[in-house]
Amino acid sequence: MLTPRLPRSWQRRDLVIAGIVTVLEVLGLRTGPPVPTPSAALGSVGLLLALAQGVPLLWRRTHPVAVLGVTTAAFVAYAVLIVPVPPYGALVALATLAVRREARAAAGATALLVAACGVAYLPPPGPADDVAPSAVVAVVVGVTAQLVRERRARIEAQARRVAAEERLRIARDLHDVLGHSLGGIAVQSSTGRLALDAGAPDAARDALVAIESASRESMREVREVLGVLRDSGTPGLEALEDLVGSSRAAGLTVEVARHGDLEGLPPDTSRTAYRVLQEALTNAAKHAGPGRVQVAVRRTAGLLAVEVVDEGRAAAGAGPDGPPGHGLVGMRERVTAAGGTMAAGPDPDAGWRVRVELPTTGRGLT
């Protein structure tokens, strides 16, 4: 036998709230001050009005305005005809509406309930002293609900901002990984083709081996990027030798100079420095001319300096054609996010120079 399912809008919590409010209203009918002219008909009306303040709360999420109107009207009629009882149902409906609507709508709904309290409590024999407490409670509920709404909006905005930053970080890492690997593959492919044309199968075989190695490394790093980019899987300067080795295998002449202790760097700084070097070496492979690439990594008190000088650009006519590509823009974004500075451009004496300075204290984003 199938168990009947409640509508999705009737969540368990809504059923509990509606039940509690209905019970409070019914108990208020029985335990309130005596009605001047009690009758069976009036008792039946009071029961219906009590139900009208509780049962509509089942639809408070889907029809907040209508539910507030019904519960408020039932509260006023209940207070005038039977006995004033706090507007439990209207307060719940007000809270729901104020959480879901903007400040203007919430203020209007709060003013409506405050006015309803005045109408309900002022006519005799209603106690006028109850107007202020009920009105204050309505205002507090409306303001609190608006504060909850604003807090939720801030949390959602923060979540969207974090998601956007994560998408940007993934885009940068994919560019860095694929740009470096594909740049090397392009150079080795050209080398292999020229070797075949020159009748040098051994050199062509070496180029194919380098292409295979670069492809496998690229696949591994892409898996890491698509694996939500865990910090532990993102390489840092500890992988500098592997990075330089892959660049040399791609045909670059790379010289590396280290100054200072590079151990124990903050993870963000180390990863940013690695990505900068990766992109700079990729660009060097793309625009390589005769010459060499010099890499210098220097750590001083509170600062890590990374410099890449592509001497091949001097012979090839320093500088790429056209505006800066995504690689240079992404590199600068990474450095800025990590709290560092970057300078890149042609050097009359060297060809093309990229210099980055990163703080080794504090926390940045890569």
Image (cartoon, grey):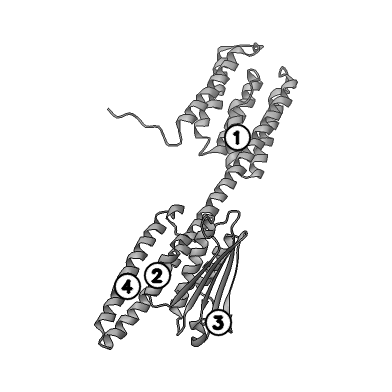
Q: How far apart are marks 1 and 2 (CA)?
A: 64 Å
Q: What residue type is labelled 2?
A: Gly
Q: Are marks 4 and 2 in contact (CB under 8 Å)?
A: no
Find disc 1 in the rendering and name its residue: 95
- Left or right side of 203 for 179: right
Q: Which of marks 1 and 3 is nearer the N terminus?
A: 1
Dot placed on the residue nearer the N-terminal end, 2 or 3: 2
Measure how far apart labels 2 and 3 are at the Cα level. Answer: 23 Å
The secondary structure type at the circle numbered 3 is: loop
| Relative depth, front residue between 297 and 119 | 297
To which residue does mark 4 refer?
A: 211
The residue closer to the viewer here, 204 or 121, is 204
Q: Mark 2 highlights which residue? A: 245
Residue 92 visible in image: yes
Q: Residue at the spot x=56%, y=50% of the render?
A: 158
User: Is the residue under label 4 in contact with that under label 1 (CB below 8 Å)?
Assistant: no
Q: What residue type is labelled 1?
A: Ala
- Which callout, 4 or 2, points at the residue further toward the start of the chain? 4
- Distance Cα–Cα, label 4 vs label 2: 13 Å
